[in-house]
Image (cartoon, rainbow, N blue to C red):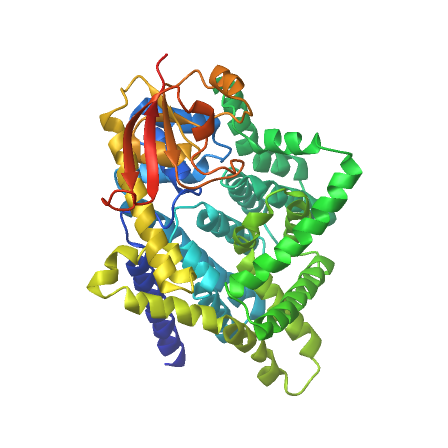
Amino acid sequence: MYTTARNSLLILSFIVVAVFYYFLTWSSGLPLLGGDHPVYLLMADHFSFFPGLKPEVSAVAMRYTAFPPFYPLLMGVLGGTSAHVDVAHAITTTFLLAAVLVYFVWLWNETQSVLKAFLLALIFSFLPTTLLESLGILSENLYLLLTLLAIWLVNKPDISLQRLYAIAAVIGLAAITRTIGVTLIGAFVVYLLIHKKEQWMRLVLVSIAPLVLWNILRWILDYKGGYLGLVADIVKRGPLVELITRQISIESHALWVGWIMGLDELPTLMTLIAGSVLGVICLAGTIYRIYMRKLDGIYLLFYFCLLMLWPFSLEAKRFLYAILPIFLFHGLEFCGYMLQRLTLKKIIIFSYPLAIVLVAFPAAGLFFNRMALATHAENRIYENSSDWYSDPNLDSARKIIRSHLMLVRSWRKVSQFVPENDCVYHVDAPSLMLYADRRSYSPPIAFTKKQFLKMANYCHYFYLGSYTRIPYRQVFYPKDLIAGTGKIIFIDRMNDVAGAPILGMLVEIPP
């Protein structure tokens, strides 16, 4: 009777979480301007049999993207294309819910406690970073599902060879979902060696096969995008030892900031202190899992080491999200290890999830408050924007989101003026391609007009936008480099009043 009631409660809880997330994420738009979301939709179009953008447009995205193919491939096959962004959101949300379910089962196996597993899975489901990440069309949730699946499958005292091959295949798919999945392959190799598994070499070959095949295909198709080129450019900037030392210093601080902001976007002093203590506990748990020769502990060691050398500190919060549930479990495991001899163990052990709730409560409370505000008719246009949930100033959030929506409207106009056989230079090429259905390329970086016009000779159109993206620092770039050489096709402003701030403009330069 108790088991039936417990199982019914668990199923009901999962249904409630699922309904909440499908309601939250169902949208035909993207959560913010730019980012990786447009790139994944363009790639999904390229892989899809369903209607989408012109093949030559999505082919440009495929040729220059650095992202692995598995996530957009699944989206394209399942119909999550640029023509059906709501379906893409639903698919991504399904990956998140499946990851939560696997996480719960893994925790149950590890802790032998339904209550602990349920609490930690529920806490992860409603952390501020999970809520915000769920709004996007990004590969983290699929990657999280695959890594948790591999870790759960390996969680047996006597693993059969068939199961190990299944684990190797799942790890291989994770590596072509996110590039950082190579750390999971590295951890798997170490795991096989220290546990002296039979046929370890064949298992390693199975785990790297998808990555090798993808890179061979990239070479055959002459896909030019990739992270190695970006890292190689950075390495050329100075002595290697000095670069690595500076990189470790920068990234270690960025990871700490990313961890704190994953709990609260606007941390107070109390959040900083309590969040830092939680981070130390979780890190100690990771060390303990490494000592226990567990795959998840070895994996996080490899993951953190690579993040220390990865030159993208601004994305630290997103990178940590992909391991967050594992890291939280490590904290719980360490607390259990330290308190196993105390008589009050059962009471104290639950103070750990309570501490996470208290630290994350202000940011989660703000999120749900904004959800309630978005139900009002005048706020409906903001309900699926990440700025609406993360910006503490409502007026600022409204202004940012409105400008983003107007820029999207401006990009859609581009197809009326640019011929199908021509293209457009823009600092945010993927976003323009997604909405304008025209090929777009990032403009070259130059310091003189003559040099720039010599390099930018492929497209005859330039879209000058009112915002910047790395590595561009100048608003409306390359306005100064093409001044007086072309004609303005149209100008879009924040409103129709003369003299209102300009959002963007399309400029044509004759051949």
Tell me, yes or no, if residue 53 can be seen here: no
Q: In the image shown, does 269 or 274 lie closer to the viewer?
A: 269
The residue sitting at the front extreme is: 499
Image location of residue 465, percent across then percent down: 39, 37
Is residue 351 found left or right of 118 in the rendered image? right
The image quarter in which residue 58 lies: top left
Count of residue discs? 0
Q: In the image shown, does 258 or 153 lie closer to the viewer?
A: 258
Whether 358 is drawn above or below 437: the answer is below
The C terminus lies in quadrant: top left
The N terminus lies in quadrant: bottom left
Q: In the image shown, does 297 or 430 lie closer to the viewer?
A: 430
Is residue 39 found left or right of 316 in the rendered image? left
Image location of residue 471, percent across then percent down: 54, 36
The residue at the point 50 percent across, 74 percent down is: 357
The residue at the point 60 percent across, 32 percent down is: 230
Whether 454 is drawn above or below 391: the answer is above
Image location of residue 418, percent across then percent down: 28, 23
Image location of residue 416, percent across then percent down: 22, 27
The residue at the point 53 percent across, 27 percent down is: 445
The residue at the point 70 percent across, 32 percent down is: 237
